[in-house]
Amino acid sequence: MFQVKAMLNTIDIAIIRGLKAVSSPLARFAIFAIFFWFGALKLIGASPANPLVADLLEKTLPFITFEQFIIFFGIYEMIVGITFLIPRLERLAIALLIPHMIITFLPLFLLPTITWQGPFVPTLEGQYIIKNLVIIALAFSVASHLHPEEENPK
């Protein structure tokens, strides 16, 4: 019985080490894929989020045309994705992610008729926004693997 437990512990340790080795690169790639893909969809006018973006833009920045904003927003999303892939740009990536997350959560408060069916019951659009909590968790995971700047060799 002790040998089986020891063998299972050895396997467990190997799996955990393997997961630690791939978790940050996988998280970085996942964030890249989502942001680059969704940004590209905005640029070609194929994003299912465009109507929601248009409604939010009308409510918050009505002096900017949707056509101008969606191009900027699509490029911004693609840049966020790319910066998550490039080593040593993680801090910039996270800094770019923060305003994006704030903006993407705004419809939950500013457009409740579009994002909520009832109390604690999101619409499909609301679910689309709430899933961003997973992106935030992934970004935290990436950030947890960083080293303080003073520890980085110049």
Image (cartoon, rainbow, N blue to C red):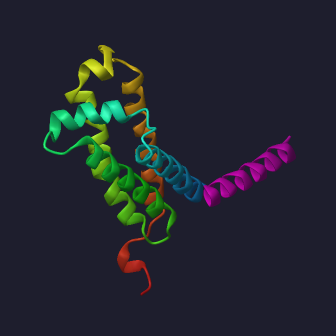
Residue 101 highlighted magenta (yes or no): no
Determine whether 119 is above or below 79 in the image.
above
Determine whether 130 is above or below 121 in the image.
below
Q: Quadrant of the N terminus?
A: top right
Residue 104 pos. (x, y %)? 31, 39
Dominant SS of magenta comes to helix
The residue drawn where x is 39% and y is 34% is 49
Q: Quadrant of residue 124?
A: top left
User: Nearest the camera: 43 or 96?
Assistant: 43
Q: Quadrant of the C terminus?
A: bottom left
Residue 71 pos. (x, y %)? 34, 50
Determine whether 130 is above or below 24 in the image.
above
User: Nearest the camera: 21 or 71?
Assistant: 71
The residue drawn where x is 31% and y is 18% is 116
In this picture, which residue range is highlighted in magenta? Answer: 1-22
User: Nearest the camera: 78 or 65?
Assistant: 65
The residue drawn where x is 54% and y is 52% is 27
Instruction: Examine the rendering and report whether any part of residue 87 can be seen.
Output: yes
Residue 26 pos. (x, y %)? 59, 54
Horizontal side, residue 92 vs residue 137: left or right = left
